[in-house]
Image (tube, rainbow, N blue to C red):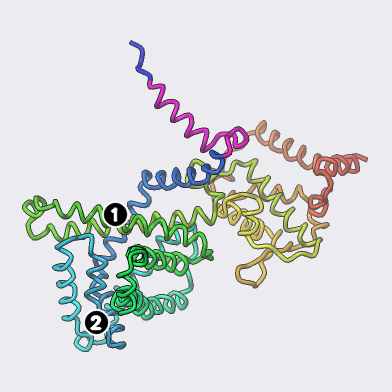
Amino acid sequence: MSPVRHPVGNGVTRTWTQLLWGDAAALPGWQKRLRLPARMLHAIVRDLLAGRLTLQAMSLVYTTLLSLVPLLAVSFSVLKGFGVHNQLEPMLLQALHPLGADAQEIAERLINYVDNTNVRVLGAVGLAVLLWSVLSLISKIEQVFNMTWRVARQRPLAERFSRYLSVLLVGPVLLFSAVAASASLRNYSVVQRLADIAPLGWLLQGAERLVPLVLITLAFAFAYNFVPNTRVRFAPSLVGAAVAGVLWLMAGDLFGQFMAGSTRYAAIYSGLAILILFMIWLYIAWIIVLVGANIAFYAQYPEYLMSRDRDFRLSNRLRERLALLLMQAVVRRHYSGADAVDDETLAHDLGMPLTNVRNQVELLTDAGYLVATASDPPRYVPAQAPERVKVRALLRHVRRFGEDQSATPSLPTGAPVAQLETCLQQAMDDALGEMSLKDLAAEAAPATNIASHTVARGA
């Protein structure tokens, strides 16, 4: 029996595949404009289905539950210094609004826990544990954001400590100021008079609905810029924050409707129903935050959208080509008198993911072909005179990368294999001849240079 075919579904799949990975020249104009958003949507769904974002969200939920009361206690202490600590509960109610009627009970319980946390009674050890619980939450968020931005290095301990303290001290004040501003705007007599005028009243109602979205978007944009240990441009972070803000409000409304009809869950789980639903909302909230962070990352580095997989894997041929292109770009800047270039600029110029460029730049730096300047971020210049460095020596280092850390040197090599490797290496050396990095950076075609050097060597 022949299988049943679905021409409509197959047609949609072919159209979607063509839009994502087909030849861009063959696409209509409107599909070309949709290609980048479609690839970003594909990347976000791919990361969600792979389980990376869900695992990170679950980890953050666990850390949040452990650190929530200490975080509120520290925020309560900061707000108390400004005489506005009584506004902590309204802020909690606004954050827990999707939980419906249970939000009031959860907020009251958390406030009672905070009130019972007497810093004077805790002592030095208790205060240290309290601060450690709060700092561990911020540190966990930084680790997750660093993974999103493909950053392997953490900040120095002193810098992390100063940043975390600034978040703890400034964050509650900014949050209270934003909430208070949006709440007090409606209380001014001028605003109330303007609201009575029909056209202005409609505009004020629309603006009032936009205020929560604007505040949430700014808060997310601040987190995406401040937390990761890398340079995040404002425009990409604002794009991710705006999408996360819209998703946050939509999820809040949907979850509120779900809570309105969740009386049967209370009958099943009894007193644990509030805690379970609270954990579910925390999980959804962290998923939204991480989705926004990934959108900001892909908006800043669209080169990562050129691959169907999360990480772009280079073949041996592409690794050699990337090394030659990097050295060519750096040496050309060296001879033209232009400023040195950093790895992010190199990645954008070559249209390659930043991770692959950084790995290759690190290889060339360790091999002694590039040297980093003391600027922040570091820029790269030739470590040696380019006219003295042979291209064949550079390619030999690239081809042997990783042999010291792998089992390759211990592989048995018989006489035929060893002879073949020697012939291949000799053929490459003969083809490249005495070609230097200066010749590689010349404007003439590389093939012409290679041919001339080969002839010169044969002569």
Q: Position of residue 36 (x, y in %)?
A: 52, 46
- Residue 148 image label: none
Q: Residue at position x 79%, y 58% from top?
A: 386
Q: Nearer the viewer, residue 78 or 159?
A: 78
- The answer to whether residue 168 is left or right of residue 277 is right
Specify which label sits upstream in the sequence, 1 or 2.
Answer: 2
Q: Quadrant of residue 252?
A: bottom left
Q: Quadrant of the C terminus?
A: top right
User: With respect to residue 281, does 396 lie above or below?
Assistant: above
**What residue does disc 2 label?**
126
In front here: 240 or 422? 240
Q: Residue at (53%, 64%) from the top-left corner? A: 233
Relative image position of residue 356 (x, y in whole percent):
58, 51
x and y percentages locating residue 166 in the rendered image = 41, 79
Residue 202 percent coordinates (x, y): 34, 63
- Placement of the N terminus among the 4 image quadrants: top left
Q: Does residue 189 belong to the magenta stretch?
A: no
Q: Residues within 10 Å of mark 1 (few under 14, many from 20)?
A: some
Callout in the foreground (1, 2):
1
The residue at the point 15 percent across, 72 percent down is 108
Residue type at mark 1 is Ala
**Residue 15 is one of the magenta-drawn residues:** yes
**Which residue is tagged 1?**
251
The CA distance from mark 1 to mark 2 is: 37 Å
Q: Which stretch is magenta?
A: 6-29
Helix or strand or loop: what does disc 1 sit on?
helix
Number of callouts in the render?
2
Q: Residues within 10 Å of mark 2 (few under 14, many from 20)?
A: few
Report the magenta stretch's main SS. helix
Secondary structure beneath dot 2 equals: helix
Residues under numbered marks 1 and 2 in contact, where contact means CB atoms less than 8 Å apart? no
